[in-house]
Image: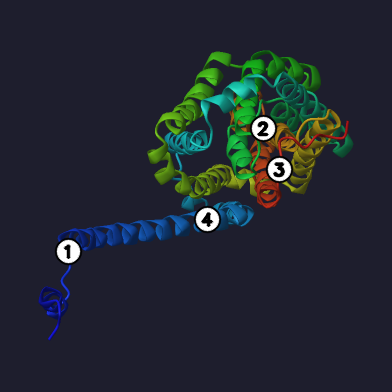
Amino acid sequence: MDPNPHLCRFRQQPETESPVSSRRRQWRKPETEAEARKAKSNNGREIVVRLGEALSLGFPLCVGSACGVALWRPSTFLWVSRELQIAGLTVTMLGMGMTLKLEDLRAALLMPKQLAAGVFLQYTVMPLSGYFISKLLKLPSYYAAGLILVSCCPGGTSSNLVTYLARGNVALSVLMTATSTLAAAVMTAFLTSKLAGQFVAVDPIGLFKSTVQAVLAPVLIGATLNQYCNNLVEVVSPLMPVIAVLSVSTLGGGAIAQNASALLTSGFQVLVASFSLHASGFFFGYLFSRMLGIDVSSCRTISIEVGMQNATLGLVLASQHFGSPLTAVPCAVSGICHLIYGSVLAGIWRCMPSTKDEKGCV
């Protein structure tokens, strides 16, 4: 007989789960379901991120394919209106702003060396390159005037997209675009009149308003969202590289489609002149900024800003202020060239590290 019958009865009873353990077990299931949903969400986010990276690396192919299709079948991209172009740029710039914080923009304002060097190179390297290339290739007067005109234009808003994809200094890119656009009120007219021999009128107020609406305002809104609404930014940010690549490809296709007939009849000489102009801008923009001891990320930005012009502005000015319609042809070709160069550089530089504290040659 067991000396302790109470203990015997306790041992014979089947093991039962305590109320506390039961409650703990019941709570595990919702936690497991939440973890499963989170894992599924992370998998979906990872897929979008990988898609964005793939499109970013294939950026040159995307732009080149769009341009080729637009030249072969212009009707494919004729639906790209000016309103859609502005909307696409605005949404993309909003996404780029989400990669920044307000501190980044304030820091860009504290970079007078980079900003001054970029704007100076913008209005020296490109205009002089356009002038000497026109002389070297002995372009007809209307082609020479168009090439010099586009070389004297400010940086285009597409440069901000390319800087974003190339892992450059986006805040500096936005400020350079705005500053060169403001300076265009004087510099574009003055340089074109001196180098091309004709006076060109520019609407600085309209240019500045367009820059604010399509570039500065979306970037500031995006940076503000990143500062105060991180949850929203974490959801949207993986889509931004995809939108950026599609926007630039569509803009390139639209520019080709609207000028396809002129491009097909413009001749090989204009293509050589335009490609040489932008090659000079990208190369010397990077070289001279590195010689000034500027960091790699900002050098990429300056190179892109100098090499990519506002070809749309050149087209408008050529059609309004020059007698020959052929003056606009170099401007249209320029819009293609800088997108091709920019997309290639973005694909290359995106694969290469960029450290802001890495100093230049001097």
Instruction: Tell me how far mark 2 sits from mark 4, CA to CA.
Output: 26 Å
Q: Residue, x 17% and y 68% (percent of image)?
A: 17
Q: Is residue 328 above or below residue 340?
A: above
Residue 309: which numbered mark, if any? 2
Looking at the image, is mark 3 or mark 2 nearer the viewer? 3
Label 2 or label 4, whichever lies nearer to me, is 2
Determine whether label 1 and label 3 are within 8 Å by CB.
Answer: no
Instruction: Determine contact: label 3, label 4, CB under 8 Å.
Output: no
**Front position among marks 1 and 3:** 1
Q: Is residue 216 above or below residue 76?
A: above
Pick whichever of labels 2 and 4 is earlier in the sequence. Answer: 4
Label 2 element class: loop
Q: Amino acid at mark 3?
A: Ser
Label 1 and label 4: CA atoms lie apart by 75 Å
Instruction: Give the mark nearer the N terminus: 3 vs 2.
Output: 2
Q: Quadrant of the C terminus?
A: top right
Q: Which residue is mark 4?
A: 73
